[in-house]
Image (cartoon, rainbow, N blue to C red):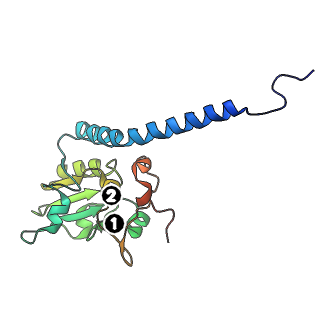
């Protein structure tokens, strides 16, 4: 007499059920990503209502600001880790550690320059922007969606040797929101 559970491990029906569950899970996860981006942005808007935001792409966006021939360009500041910045960043962006202020970049507190801060998805940039506003920086904005949304849209990135198309995901909670084609597997 055979014991229950001995012999065949998986029946064809069991394998089919597992495959269907996996496919359904992947489909739900893919459908969830756009909603999750919007939910994440909405959460930051609620938590930091006084911080102005700018989109990556659109009519009133950082991309159009970069493309303007007239007027002053913003100072774009990356507040991710040095390694992430070194791998790729927005063109012309300067790196600033979280504990620093723009003074470390030669930008005084009483400046009239526009500052656009970004990180991976917003978790660091919003609190830094709020802190800078309290210190007297009047024209501070955060790139909504951070470098992840910028890269997901295929917008230009700069690296140590010129243009790049990928971003190091680092240890960000938002790493799952970075599209696969925009994700770097490791530092060069």
| Quarter holding residue 80 | bottom left
Farthest bottom residue in view: 161
Residue at left offset 26%, top offset 63%: 77
Q: 141 or 184: which is nearer to us?
A: 184
Q: Residues within 10 Å of mark 1 (few under 14, many from 20)?
A: many
What is the number of the mark on residue 78? Answer: none
Give residue 147's mark.
2
Q: CA distance from mark 1 to mark 2?
A: 7 Å
Residue 48, percent from left and from top: 23, 41
Q: In the picture, which quadrant includes the N terminus?
A: top right
Q: Quadrant of residue 98?
A: bottom left
Question: What's the residue at 67%, 30% (across, down)?
Answer: 13
- In the displayed structure, would residue 187 be above or below residue 138? below
Residue designated by label 1: 89
Which element carries disc 2, helix, strand or loop?
helix
Callouts 1 and 2 close, C-beta under 8 Å: yes
- Image position, residue 107 (x, y; %): 19, 67
């Amino acid at each position: 007499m055979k014991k229950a559970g001995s012999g065949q491990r998986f029946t064809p029906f069991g394998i089919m059920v597992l495959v269907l569950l996996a496919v359904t899970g992947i489909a739900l996860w893919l459908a969830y990503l756009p909603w999750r981006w919007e939910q994440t942005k909405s959460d930051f808007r609620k938590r930091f209502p006084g911080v102005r935001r700018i989109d990556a792409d659109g009519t009133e966006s950082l991309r159009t600001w970069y493309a303007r021939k007239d007027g002053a360009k913003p100072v774009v500041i990356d507040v991710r880790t040095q390694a992430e910045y070194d791998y790729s960043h927005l063109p012309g962006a300067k790196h600033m550690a979280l504990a620093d202020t723009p003074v470390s970049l030669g930008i005084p507190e009483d400046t009239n320059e526009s500052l656009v801060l970004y990180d991976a998805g917003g978790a660091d940039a919003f609190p830094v922007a709020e802190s800078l506003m309290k210190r007297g920086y009047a024209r501070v904005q955060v790139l909504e969606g951070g470098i992840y949304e910028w890269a997901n849209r295929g917008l230009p990135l700069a690296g140590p040797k010129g243009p790049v198309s990928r971003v190091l995901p680092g240890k960000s909670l938002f790493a799952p929101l970075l599209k696969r084609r925009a994700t770097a597997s490791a530092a060069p």
